[in-house]
């Protein structure tokens, strides 16, 4: 009688098997649906070095230093700086960058504005504030100088970091710290 079928109860009933398969299909579907949502709400990681980030263009691509240094001395290049804030980098004589970048947000109401090379100043079109080339206020309604960032050049990499030292324009602690 070795060839006979065992009459013992199976270890898993048909109902348990179907419940297991249904649960596995639902878990797989939920994971597949939630992954894009979690990915969307997770901020992207950014290459950083001691609190500094790489300079990027408006599309989020890293900008090589040679691209900005190809501009004429005294010109200003607009990049996406810290927290995506538009920031001007200044090309100096001798093919280097100024160690100070100027954030392009009006201190009156936060408007962004262009550099006007003809008048040699930043001019906010919203309410008429005007700033000197170093970011100090020349004409209001803005009453604070533009925010600064540190700029460090390492090979082809341009590193941007928060300015926490004394403001060289006023000699005081910066208002944004």
Image: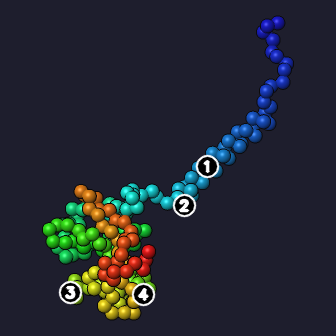
State the CA–CA distance, disc 3 to disc 2: 44 Å
* Label 3 CA crowd tier, 10 Å (few <14, some 14–19, many 20+): few
31 or 163: nearer the eye? 163
Q: Which residue carries the number 2 mark?
A: 41
Single out the mark in the foreground, 1 or 2. Answer: 2
Q: Name the residue under label 3.
A: 118
Dot 4: few (<14), some (14–19), or many (≥20) neighbours within 10 Å? some
Q: Kindly state the secondary structure of the residue where label 3 is placed.
A: loop
Alpha carbon distance from label 1 to label 3: 57 Å
- Between the residue at mark 4 and the residue at mark 1, the CA separation in whole angstroms equals 47 Å
Mark 4 lies on a secondary structure that is loop
- Disc 1 element: helix
* Cα distance in 3D space between marks 1 and 2: 15 Å
Q: Earlier in the sequence, mark 3 or mark 2?
A: 2
User: Residue 115 in the image: x percent, y percent?
Assistant: 28, 81
- Label 1 packing within 10 angstroms: few (<14), some (14-19), many (20+): few
For disc 2, the neighbor class at 10 Å (few under 14, some 14 to 19, many from 20) is few
Q: Which mark is residue 155?
A: none
- Badge 1 is on which residue? 31
Looking at the rendered image, the quarter that the C terminus falls into is: bottom left
Disc 2 from disc 4: Cα separation: 31 Å
Q: Tell us which disc is closer to us: 2 or 4.
A: 4
Q: Earlier in the sequence, mark 4 or mark 3?
A: 4
Residue 63 in view (yes/no): no
């Amino acid at each position: 009688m070795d060839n006979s079928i065992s009459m013992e109860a199976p270890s898993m009933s048909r109902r348990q098997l179907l419940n297991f398969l249904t649960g596995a299909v639902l878990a797989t579907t939920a994971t597949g649906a939630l992954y894009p949502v979690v990915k969307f709400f997770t901020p992207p990681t950014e290459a950083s070095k001691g609190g500094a980030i790489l300079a990027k263009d408006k599309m989020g691509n890293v900008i090589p230093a040679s691209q900005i240094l190809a501009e004429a001395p005294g010109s200003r290049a607009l990049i996406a700086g810290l927290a995506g804030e538009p920031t001007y980098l200044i090309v100096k004589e001798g093919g280097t960058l100024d160690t100070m970048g100027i954030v392009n947000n009006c201190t009156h109401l936060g408007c962004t504005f262009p550099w006007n090379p003809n008048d040699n100043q930043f001019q906010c079109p919203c309410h008429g504030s005007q700033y000197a080339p170093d970011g100090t206020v020349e004409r209001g309604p803005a009453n604070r100088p533009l925010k600064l960032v540190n700029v460090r050049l390492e090979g082809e990499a341009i590193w941007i970091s928060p300015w926490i030292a004394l403001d060289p324009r006023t000699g005081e602690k910066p208002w944004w710290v």
